[in-house]
Image (cartoon, rainbow, N blue to C red):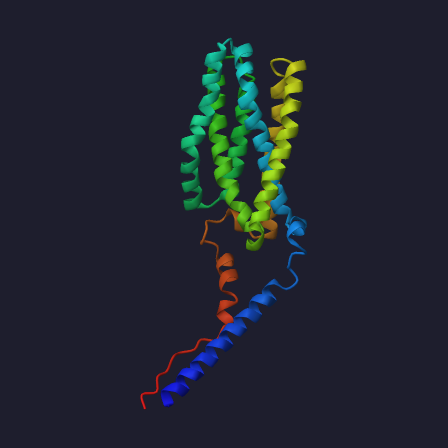
Amino acid sequence: VHGGRGGGAFVATDMLAARVLKEKMEDRHKGSELPGPLLAPLSYPLGYWLAVLTIVTTYSVSFPFSTYGTEYMHQTYNFSKEDSAHIISISSGINLFAAPFFGAVVDHFGLKLCFTCVGLVTALASVLVLLLPHWGWAITSVIMMGVSYALVTAAIWPCYSMLVPRNSLGMAYGVLTCVVNLGLAIIYPLVGLIVEHVPHYGGLLFYVPLSVAALLLGLILLRDDQVKRAGELNVREGGCPQCMRRETRYSSTVPSFELQIDEE
């Protein structure tokens, strides 16, 4: 009988603890609930949109160059079209092996936004190098572009999951994909039009402003993170005391109960 009473008391306290935890979690999300799944992006923070625009401008340089770069190499450096295509493919080959490596580096050191800005500086330099006349700089530029693409992708993509509520991650990545595709749908014909009417350096004169815009967006995102999130995006996963406090803040308020067995 005594054992039954002890078990009943434990069940009651366990239910009380669950109720307290539920109330605390509801209080945690009160006032921050999304108005609806389709309207969720309207509540996303500025940092999310800065990250989206950063990746859009970065891809708007890398992807079209993979398409129109072959003709640029052929006309500017007198490579055959076949050799030009092989040179352009170096960028994809580097990205194939460098992206997982940079991902591991970012996981180990954190510094996501710092690595992002380094990649954006490298991307801008790779475009400027193409203005130099010697064919060796063309190969150097393609290598730099592959490195920059892999580094930016590995560093900035993990940030999105830290900028929006977990119950809205699907929508966040869906919006990101939509905006990227929309940007590329606009950029591709625009670059083709410029290359058609302004041969040789026409495409580069378009890539340079885009690269500068991507770098500026990355720097603004870095500043926004420092001011609004105390550098949370730039800290290694699990190494941010503020993030750990956020995860344990509510669990620490739940009373702790010990199971006592009445031997009588």
**Image quadrant assignment for residue 187:** top right
Instruction: Give the side of residue 144 with respect to residue 188, left or right.
Output: left
- Image quadrant occupied by the C terminus: bottom left
The relative height of residue 124 versus residue 133 in the rendered view (above or below) is: below
The percent coordinates of residue 137 (x first, y second) are 49, 17
Q: Residue at x 53, y 29 (%)?
A: 123
- Image quadrant occupied by the N terminus: bottom left
The percent coordinates of residue 6 (x first, y second) are 40, 85
The percent coordinates of residue 158 (x first, y second) are 50, 45
User: Across the whole image, how many numbered discs are drawn on residues?
Assistant: 0
The relative height of residue 2 versus residue 66 in the rendered view (above or below) is: below
The relative height of residue 86 versus residue 177 in the rendered view (above or below) is: above
Q: Using the rendered image of the protein, determine whether residue 141 is visible from the camera's viewpoint.
A: yes
Instruction: Give the side of residue 93 with respect to residue 16, left or right.
Output: left
Q: Nearer the viewer, residue 168 or 206?
A: 168
Q: Residue furthest left?
A: 263
Q: Using the rendered image of the protein, determine whether residue 217 is visible from the camera's viewpoint.
A: no
Q: Residue at x 40, y 78 (%)?
A: 258
The relative height of residue 134 versus residue 140 in the rendered view (above or below) is: above
**Image quadrant assignment for residue 131:** top right
Q: Residue at x 51, y 77 (%)?
A: 16
Q: Nearer the viewer, residue 113 or 103?
A: 103
The percent coordinates of residue 73 (x first, y second) are 52, 14
Q: Residue at x 66, y 50 (%)?
A: 38
